[in-house]
Amino acid sequence: MEAYGRIGDRRIAERGSITKPDIVTVLNPALTQAVNVEAGMNEGGQLIINARKDQGLSHETVYLDATEIAVKILGVPITNTVMLGAFAAATGLVTVESVEKGARLILGPRFSEEKLERNLDAIRAGYEEVKRG
């Protein structure tokens, strides 16, 4: 699966595919062996990868074991919220506080308070893991 997002300080109406990304976030570490995750990336682009070790890629890459963090905090290997925190830390494009606020808005109505808090903890853990280097 691929998903695209655009971040800017003004409204962005474009909704098409991104063919020359500046940042690629990989939630499933097996993808680095199955597809070229760097395809079309801009020079100077950045990768944020859920992986235990360096995958030998040519762009600047941040690695973290988001699966381990998710299992520890959430009890399941669902890495979405961990990687949101990692994205905030790695790029500086959004603050961890804004990611938490967005998670509250989106997950709050659907999750129990306890489950929401665990997801917020997962966001913070991903953020802190990247900040530790």
Image (tube, grey):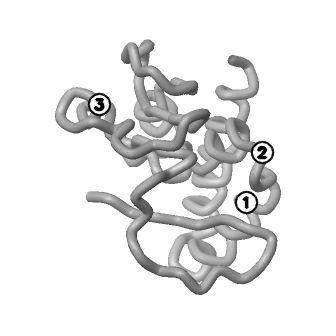
Circle 3 residue:
32
Task: Give me the residue at 32% from left, 31% from top.
Answer: 29
Q: Position of residue 126 (x, y in %)?
A: 62, 37
Question: Which badge, 2 or 3, comes first in the chain's sequence?
Answer: 3
Which of pointers 3 and 1 lies earlier in the amino acid sequence?
3
**Does residue 37 appear left or right of residue 109 in this picture?**
left
Q: Is residue 17 left or right of residue 12?
A: left
- Decide which of 101, 51 is in the foreground and name it: 51
Q: CA distance from mark 3 to mark 1?
A: 28 Å
The type of residue carrying mark 3 is Thr
Residue under the point 55% across and 46% down = 23
Residue 88 screen position, x and y as percent: 70, 46
Q: At numbered mark 2, what does the secondary structure look like: helix, strand or loop?
A: loop
Q: CA distance from mark 2 to mark 3?
A: 24 Å
Q: Nearer the viewer, mark 3 or mark 1?
A: 3
In the picture, residue 11 is in which quadrant?
bottom right
Residue topped by disc 1: 100
User: 10 Å neighbourhood of mark 2: few (<14), some, or many (≥20)?
Assistant: few
Residue position marked by numbered label 2 in the rendering: 92
For the residues labelled 2 and 1, the Cα–Cα distance comes to 14 Å
Label 1 sits on what residue type?
Glu
User: From the image, which quarter does the C terminus lie in?
Assistant: top right
| Residue 76 visible here | no
Rendering quarter of residue 130: top right
Q: Do the CB atoms of the residues marked 2 and 3 lie less than 8 Å apart?
A: no
Q: Are marks 3 and 1 in contact (CB under 8 Å)?
A: no
**Kind of residue sitting beneath label 2:** Gly
Q: Quadrant of the N terminus?
A: bottom left
